[in-house]
C-alpha cells in the first residue's frame, strides 16, 4: 500500500478515557493532532468534527477518515447498526451512532473499527508487523483488548474479537481477588487489567516496585492468554502494548512464562529459541492506535 502524497487522511483513536484526532499520512507526516476527554457522544464527536473542519480550513481537504474506537461496536457495513456503539458500561454511549455523526458533517469515506484492530493495522502498516500475514495486537491497560490480523485481513467474524474476556486459570489460594469484570468477574480482563491491579494491590501499577509479587502474577495471567491465542490463531507474532503491557520489566517475564505454558507443543524455532522475537512491544509505541486510524482512512479511500 502506497501513500498518495497529495492526499490527507483524518484519524480518530476513540478511547474510553480520551479521544486523539490527527491529520496526516503516516508516522513521519502527522500535520495536526488534538486530544480531549471522552465525555458524552454528542460533545466528544462535536469536538472531533470541529477539529477536522479547522484542519481542512488550514491544510486542505481531508480525503477520508479512519475511526478506531472503543467497543463493543458494530463494524459491519451491511448491518443496520453499523457505526454504532453496542451495549457498554460507559454511560451515555450505548447505541451512539458515532459514524453517522461524522457522515452528517463530511461527505467522504469513513472506515470504522475497534481501537485494537486499528492499532493492529497501524503496526502492520508501519510497525513490528510489517510483512506478516497473521498476528495479534494486544493492549493491556485500563482494560484489555486484542486485534487480530489473519491471512492479510483484520479479523471481525460475528462481531469482533473480545480477547480480554477469555477465561484464565484462577488459583484463589495464590490470588483470592475476585476480579473486576462486570460481566464475567475473573476473566482475563477481570484479573489482569490495570483496574484489577489497582484494586487488588491498593495502588496504581506504576507505583509497584519491579520486584513486587504483582508482576509474576500479572505475567502468568498474560502468558496464559498468549498461549491460548497461540494455540487457536497460530499468529506469527504477538505485539503487546498498553500502559501495563508495555512495561519493560514485565515483557521478559511474559515471554518466559508463555514459553513454559506452551511447553514445546508448538514446534517452531520462533517460540522454542527466539521467544523475544515472537512476543514484542509495539514498534509505534503509544502511537499505534492513532496511526492505525490513519491507516484505516487509507483503506477507506481504496475501497470507495
Image (cartoon, rainbow, N blue to C red):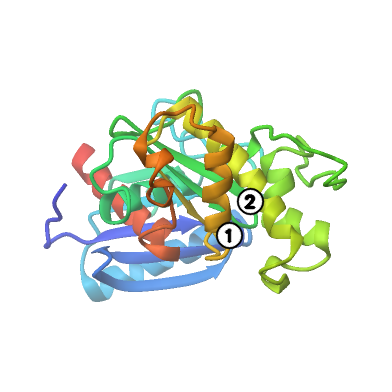
Rendered location of residue 28, percent (x, y): 24, 70
N-terminal-most mark, 1 or 2: 2
The image quarter in which residue 156 lies: top left
Q: Measuring 73% from the left and 68% from the top, which residue is drawn there? A: 204
Residue 118, relative to residue 208: is it above or below? Answer: above
* Closer to us: 76 or 127: 127
Residue furthest bottom in the image: 58
Image location (x, y in percent) of residue 221: 66, 44
Q: Residue at x 51, y 49 (%)?
A: 255
Residue at which label 2 appears: 219
Crowdedness of circle 2 by 10 Å Cα count: few (<14), some, many (20+)?
A: many
Please tell me which residue lies in front, 212 or 263: 263
- Left/right of residue 115 with respect to residue 216 in the rendered view: left
Please say if 229 is above or below 44.
above
Q: Are marks 1 and 2 in contact (CB under 8 Å)?
A: yes
Task: State the image coordinates of residue 294 (x, y, percent, origin top left).
Answer: 31, 56
Q: Quadrant of the C terminus?
A: top left
| Residue at mark 1 | 250
- Can residue 172 be spotted in the picture? yes
Residue 39 is labelled as none
Tally of numbered tags: 2
Query: In the picture provided, is 299 more to the left or to the right than 148?
Result: left
Residue 192 in percent (x, y) is at 69, 49
Q: Residue at x 49, y 62 (%)?
A: 46
Q: Is residue 85 visible?
A: no
Left or right of residue 253: residue 214: right
Closer to us: 266 or 126? 266
Residue at (28, 34) in percent of width and height: 152
Q: Which of the pair 67/182 is nearer the observer?
A: 182
Amino acid at each position: 500500500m502506497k501513500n498518495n502524497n497529495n492526499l490527507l487522511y483524518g484519524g480518530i483513536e476513540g478511547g474510553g478515557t480520551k479521544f486523539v484526532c490527527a491529520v496526516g499520512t503516516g508516522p513521519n507526516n502527522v500535520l495536526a493532532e488534538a486530544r480531549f476527554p471522552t465525555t458524552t457522544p454528542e460533545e466528544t464527536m462535536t469536538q472531533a468534527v470541529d477539529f477536522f473542519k479547522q484542519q481542512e480550513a488550514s491544510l486542505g481537504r481531508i480525503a477520508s477518515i479512519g475511526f478506531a474506537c472503543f467497543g463493543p461496536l458494530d463494524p459491519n457495513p451491511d448491518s443496520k447498526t453499523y457505526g454504532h456503539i453496542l451495549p457498554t458500561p460507559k454511560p451515555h454511549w450505548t447505541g451512539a451512532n458515532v459514524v453517522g455523526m461524522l457522515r452528517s458533517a463530511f461527505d467522504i469515506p469513513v472506515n470504522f473499527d475497534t481501537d485494537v484492530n486499528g492499532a493492529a493495522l497501524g503496526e502492520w502498516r508501519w510497525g513490528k508487523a510489517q510483512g506478516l500475514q497473521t498476528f495479534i495486537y494486544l493492549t493491556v491497560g485500563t482494560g484489555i483488548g486484542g486485534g487480530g490480523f489473519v491471512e492479510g485481513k483484520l479479523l471481525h467474524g460475528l462481531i469482533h474479537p473480545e480477547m480480554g474476556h477469555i477465561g484464565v486459570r484462577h488459583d484463589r489460594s495464590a490470588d483470592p481477588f475476585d476480579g473486576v469484570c462486570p460481566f464475567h468477574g475473573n476473566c482475563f480482563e477481570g484479573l489482569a487489567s490495570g483496574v484489577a491491579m489497582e484494586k487488588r494491590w491498593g495502588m496504581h501499577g506504576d507505583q509497584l516496585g519491579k520486584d513486587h509479587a504483582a508482576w509474576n502474577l500479572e505475567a502468568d495471567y498474560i502468558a496464559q492468554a498468549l498461549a491460548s491465542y497461540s494455540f487457536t490463531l497460530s499468529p506469527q507474532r504477538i505485539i503487546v502494548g498498553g500502559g501495563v503491557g508495555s512495561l519493560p520489566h514485565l515483557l521478559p517475564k511474559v515471554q518466559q512464562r508463555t514459553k513454559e505454558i506452551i511447553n514445546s507443543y508448538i514446534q517452531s524455532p520462533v517460540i522454542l529459541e527466539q521467544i523475544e522475537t515472537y512476543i514484542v512491544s509495539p514498534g509505534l509505541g503509544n502511537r499505534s492506535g492513532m496511526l492505525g486510524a490513519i491507516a484505516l482512512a487509507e483503506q477507506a479511500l481504496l475501497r470507495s
